[in-house]
Amino acid sequence: MNSFKFLSLAALTTFFISCSDSKSTADDGNKEQTKTEAKQNNDFSTGIYTATLPCADCMGIENYITFQKDNKAVKSTSYLDSDGTSENEYGTWTKNDDIIELSIANSPTEYYLVKPNKTLVRLNADKKEVSGELAKNYIFKQIKAYTPAQLNGTYHSNTSEKGYNEILTLTSENDSIYSVKISFTGAAKGCKFEGKGKLVNNQIDVDLKTINKDLKGTITILFKENTAEVFTSKFEDRFALNYFCGGGASLAGDYHKK
């Protein structure tokens, strides 16, 4: 009888130890799974991120940042109440833990916190998140780059087809290089332009020096739905768009896809 009790006690002890070990192993497994899932959720993906940052004396500043796989970066900024200017700045990025540091020449270093669901949060100079009602404006969301299928085609400044009409034709050579051509109808004089542009941050940039070494500035083509907005990256360079036109016309303006 005593032997039976001893064996039963030993069996129970072994059972509880086994259960305890199993529970510990399961807990460790759950913790590792949680860590793995958290890491996957916060994994940084290169590409284009955008947000409209608040502005004290304007409607907002639209930001696009492309983080390239080679650790180079391109940042585009445009004021919502501007004439369509959008200037690109080039720099580099590095990632330390969950914080991305964006370095652009002659500008303070910018910090972005990696968040789940392919989002980034712009941090302040102390690497802290902005709090309060404006916090949501500092969230950058990843978007897809435009494809040739979306951008290729003809765009018209006058969709009525009556009177003067400028025609913008975009033809892709690959995913990032586009042939840009502007012609006109409906008048004796108008605009003629041909050049090559590069798709950066979902806008096409054409360096005017590649067309004429005496010109300065960059033509930018911004896209909103089925409209292409042509202007210069800097407002002071806008008169360069008259160089390619006669009769007082300009390349600047909105072109609608047909």
Image: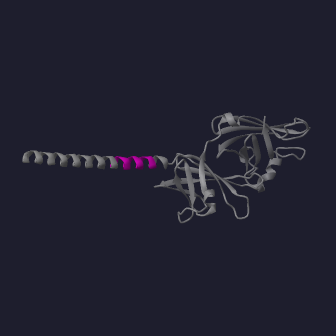
**View extreme (bottom): residue:** 126
- Looking at the picture, tell me which residue is in the foreground, 57 or 172: 57
Tell whether 219 sits left or right of 99. Answer: right
User: Bounds of the magenta span?
Assistant: 28-38
Report the predominant secondary structure element of the magenta stretch: helix
Q: Where, quadrant-wise, is the C terminus in this rendering?
A: top right
Q: Position of residue 239 (x, y in %)?
A: 81, 52
Percent across and percent down for residue 245 are 85, 44
**Is 239 in front, or is 6?**
6
Q: Is residue 81 left or right of residue 245?
A: left
The residue positioned 37% from the left and 47% from the top of the image is 30
- Quarter placement of the N terminus: top left
Q: Give the camera-side residue of 142 and 162.
A: 142
- Residue 4 picture location, percent across and down: 10, 44
Q: Using the image as rendered, state which of residue 244 and residue 71 is in the foreground.
A: 71
Residue 124 on image: x %, y %: 57, 63
Residue 12 in view in this figure = yes
Extreme-front residue of the structure? 1
User: Hey, which quadrant is residue 60 in on the image?
Assistant: bottom right
The colour scheme used here is one colour
Name the residue at 41% across, 49% down.
34
Residue 145 lies, with reference to residue 127, above or below; the image says above
Q: Residue at x 46, y 46 (%)?
A: 40
Based on the picture, tell me whether residue 128 belongs to the magenta stretch: no
The residue depicted at 66 percent of the width and 42 percent of the height is 199
**In this view of the protein, can residue 172 be seen by the observer?**
no
Tag count:
0
